[in-house]
Structures are given as structure tokens and as C-alpha cells.
Amino acid sequence: MSSKTCFCLGVGILFIITIGCQTQTLQSPIFEPPPELINFALLNKGAAAEASQYLPNHLPEEVIDGDISSETWDEGSGWGCTLEHLRTSDLNRRPYVRINLPEPVDIRQIVMYTIDSEQYPAAKYGLKDYRIEYWHGTGWGLIPTGDTKDRQYTARDNTKGKRVHDIRGKLFAQHIRLVPVSTNDTERVYQYMSREKPVYEVKGLGRVMELEVWGYPIATGQAAQKFAQAFAPQAEVPSSDEKLIKMVLTQYEEGYDNANLKKVMSCFSTNYNSNGRTYNDIQTRAADFFQKHHQINMTLTEINLHRNLIDETVVVSGIYVLQYTPRDNGKAERTFGELSLVLADTEEGWKIIRAN
């Protein structure tokens, strides 16, 4: 065997690589193609489906039966739901269909089929806006894709019968759910006011023919056991890490309380990327908020920490309460909601890397 020295010029760096060489006839390609993806969301693969509601003869298990055709909708194919949450714009009443896989999966792609036939074209009857979510151990988060037009939705203004959503980064999950928000046949007609909120008559149905979850199985043996532990409720965060993470959360609160942009951003990784938002997006939004408001108070309560043993991240869940006064009108305002942040132990310490 002879040896050969190769010189490769990088960005201002000279790389010297010694490569062992031998004359031979190649019998197979140097790079093997990746293994084929597997659709785990099938009844015959042990998957199960459930739903918050369903129309008669349009049961949740219809989305995992392997039949993507819309031609037999009237005979009972596909899952269907009403859109009663739009009656009072109650987000907590959004319908959903949920797929429970028999075990956690390395998910790479999710494909949604809404109704799309000659009688029921997707552009007129299919899902328009929807979310696809995954269970991360303490709550539901939007799947990380790169094709969202609106950062609150997986798809918005959809007119296609088939939508393919490629996963950006890593997604290990066992539970996936589809949340219809509106359809292309949705109509809202005002009826009356109730407790200072408008009430509407809602027309239109959610129609989903199939939901496919493509990916790879998780390794067996000790690796599989480790992954299962990642989703166990008793997965605890070491006290030393818990203390450091709570210091980050305190820093986050104090940053808002003092309108200190530098302090707020010190809590985020510069590689932060969540549902299309980057570190720079967060910085711009925070700066704009501080410019338009004062007398700010941020409070985080009911904090729970959940450790993901696969990637060593920690999910922080809880409740946030944000009080502030707009500079233009001087009227104090208050908002609150659920908090779900993912932190990682980076070279600079524990930082927020994404939000769910």
C-alpha cells in the first residue's frame, strides 16, 4: 500500500490529510443510499388512533388504515369533525385526531391527506389551516418543519389534498396529533354577543383521509431502554442542572422586568431556531416590545422540568404572566398562558434553544 498526501485549502486554513491508497476495482458504490423510510402510522404496524370528536361513520382509525383515497368519503372513509371551536373562537375546544405509535420513532416526515376528489376538491372542502403536534413529555409542541407560512400553524391557506412535511432536525416521538383549525368550506355567521364575545354559527367540516408518520425505528436493547426512559414521567433533572436552569429563568424574568434586552438575550442560544424563528427574530421582537411598553413585569410560575435522556435537553413547562403598560395610551395590560421552553447545556452554559 502506498500513501498520498492531499492539501485542501479551507477558509484561511491549510488542511493536510494523509490517505492510504490502493489500486482496486470497486465492486459497490462508495456511498450507500440511506435506508427507506417506514410509515409507522398503520393499524397493521400496531398504531392506534383516537380523537376528541368524530362524525358518524368517520372514525379516527380511518386515518391509519392505509387508504388515501377520497372517493369513498360518503361511504365512511376518513376521519371527520365539526369546527365548533370557531363558534366562540375557543382554542381549547379545537378538535384533534391523535396517533399513538406502539413505540417511540425517529420521525423524518409526516404526510397529511385531506379530502380531495372530483366531488369534494381540496380547494373547496379540504383542510385550510392546521397544526401537527407531537408529545414531548410534558405537553404538545408544533412539529419542527421548514415550510410553515405562519409560525402558529404547520400549514396555512392550504388548497392541496396531499401535504408533505419534512422534519427539520431530530424528532423522537411516540404520539402525534393533527389539529384542524379551519377548512376551505368554513363559514362563520354572526349570531349574538355573550359575555362581550361574539358567537357565530359555524358551517364546514374537517375531513382527513390519512395521516402518515415516516421515519426509522429506534435502536433496540439498551438504546431503546434509554429512549423509553426519556418519555417517562419520573425522568428527573439533576439538582445541579436544575439550579442552573432556574437561574436562567430568573435572568429571563429580570430581563423583562428591567427592559434589559442584553439580559433577556443572554438566556437564548445564538443557534436558537423554533418554528421558523431565529435568535435574531427573538431579539428584534423583544427590542420592539421594550420600545413600545414600560412598567413591565414578567412572572413564571408552576415550573416543571422534564429531562430528555436522548439528547440531554430539558423541557421547562409552566405558566407565564406578563404585565405591561403601552407607552401610547398608559393603560396597563396583562396577558398569560402556558410556557414550554427547551434548554440545552451549551458551551456557554444552559441556554434556550427552542420553544414549543
Image (cartoon, rainbow, N blue to C red):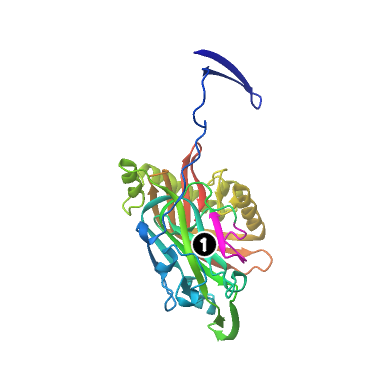
Instruction: Indicate whether residue 158 is drawn in magenta.
Output: yes
- Classify 200 as above or below 159: below
The residue tagged 1 is 112
Q: Secondary structure at mark 1?
A: strand
Circle count: 1
Whether residue 199 is visible: no
Near-viewer residue (330 or 253): 253
Q: Residue at x 61, y 60 (%)?
A: 150
Specify start and end residues of the magenta stretch as a single range: 148-165
Whether residue 354 is visible: yes
Predominant secondary structure in magenta? loop
Q: Residues within 10 Å of mark 1 (few under 14, many from 20)?
A: many
Residue 17 rendering spot, x and y as whole percentages: 56, 19
- Classify 284 as above or below 211: above
Near-viewer residue (112 or 261): 112
| Quadrant hosting residue 329 | bottom right
Residue 212 rendering spot, x and y as whole percentages: 47, 59
Q: Residue at x 34, y 58 (%)?
A: 46
Q: Residue furthest top?
A: 2
